[in-house]
Amino acid sequence: MSDLVARVRRLPPTALAFLGSLLLSLVAFAGTVTVGKDAALYLTIAQQALDKGPQAAFQGFDWPWFSLLLAGTHWLSALPLEPAAYLWCAFFMAATCALLVSASERFAAGSGYWACLVVLSMPAFNHFRDDIIREQGFWFFCLLALSLALGWLESGGWRRAALIQLATVCACLFRLEAVLVLPAIALCLVGDLHRRAGWSRLLELSALPLAAGVIAVLAMLARAGITQPRIAYYLSLLDPHTLVAGFNLMASQFASAALAKYSTDDAGKIIFFGVTATMLAKFFTLSGPLALPLLHPQSGQVVRAYWQRLRPFAWAWLAYYGVLFLFFIQQHFINSRYLSLLNLLAAPLLAVACLLFARSFPRLAKALVVAAVVVMLSNVISLGTKKTHYLEAASWLSRNTNPADPIYYEDVRIAYYAGRGYPDMPETREQVMTPQQSAKFRYFVLAPKPGDPLYLWLTEQRKPVLGQFTNRRGDTVVIMGH
């Protein structure tokens, strides 16, 4: 055991982070029984691209580049889609961890092993290790662009700027909000614009994207303003009139529902600071126990050094925080998957804070390491009951129904495992309870809870139970129909 520990300690921190990440992903994948809902969509779109050609991917999803990557991997290697997806996600996670450790070492010498602990234990993105999601590629390419920017800000050069732009484009193919990376890097040059060198760097960074933007606008005008649906959706979120109207509507609804008439004028301020506080609280929660050193008095110095030495990361953190705030105002929700990039961008900050904390409180630092290791394992080892009843229900459907049968799925993963792809379903369960909608389906596949209104309604409509499947915890899938 001591020899193994000694060999591990001889590994460079970046290599340790990469290999440790791969090992954690392997553990997470080994405990997976069913893929997530998003994964079912991406894998279905990839299969459609293989069966009908790449153009079919855009008919099922308006931003299918991840699915096309999976389809291309299968086409080149004959590797099944699901293992290919797991391999790509594991690679993206491992490479992301290595980039963050490298950035931490650039930030402060000697922080590499603390950075390993941070990136391998932080719940913000580690609890997605068993998922097949676009964010893993989005995180990797965003951090690759920002890491390249650190060297480019020191030495400049058109080739390095082109590599930054290429990494940003790759990130945008996973999630379009990655476009914020280039403005964040450009903001790092604001202090140098009084010199010719600053303008030269800005030209290197922006000339090619501006030219591409002009060509794209001209192409849209030539096609009578037709644009890609995903791009149109993001542009609608940035529309100032829509944004202001959404914020005012939220403030008025909040004031009428929760505030006395004497406080209605402050509704907007309460929402603004409330959303800010909520996102910051989630940021600290998703950082895990290794966020505690930020409470140390020396953390202020660490934050200032972070802004000086990792400016692209710091500006990207602020820019992405602004994106999340706008999204919350427009869509009225936020989740940990969207927030995770904030935690990733702050990982070098947390690593250096932990390093200083360990120097000041070596005994407490050991307890912090133990807590981080426990969180690390809990992120990838699930002791909960698996959704085996989903697989049993899917098997029944594949044997007893026809692909052309109209079926309502409460969870479309059952359709995926039944070989029926990723069908479109009504947006709400209440819609299914209308005579017009219910008449469209021959079978209903439900995961009902006690007193479930849709299950009770179908029972009142005298829909017989054709199959019932239960896992060890007692969760049930019920198939009802004619």
Image (tube, rainbow, N blue to C red):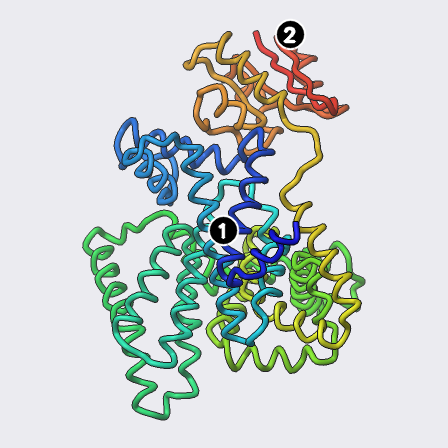
Q: Earlier in the sequence, mark 1 or mark 2?
A: 1
* Residue found farthest to the bottom: 194
Along the viewing direction, whichever of 140 and 352 lies nearer the viewer: 352
Query: Disc 1 marks which amino acid?
Result: Met
With respect to residue 191, does 136 lie above or below? above
Examine the rendering and report whether any part of residue 42 can be seen: yes
User: Which residue occupies 64% across, 53% down?
Assistant: 123
Label 2 neighbourhood size at 10 Å, few (<14), some (14-19), many (20+)?
some
Label 1 neighbourhood size at 10 Å, few (<14), some (14-19), many (20+)?
many
Q: Mark 1 points at which residue?
A: 93
Query: Disc 2 marks which amino acid?
Result: Pro
Q: Mark 2 points at which residue?
A: 464
| Mark 2: secondary structure | loop
**Image location of residue 249, percent across then percent down:** 61, 58
Q: In this view, does 214 lie to the left or right of 8?
A: left
**Image location of residue 301, percent across then percent down:** 64, 82
* Residue found farthest to the left: 222
Along the viewing direction, whichever of 116 and 236 lies nearer the viewer: 116
Labels in figure, total: 2
User: Which residue occupies 42% across, 44% down?
Assistant: 88
Frontmost of labels 1 and 2 is: 1
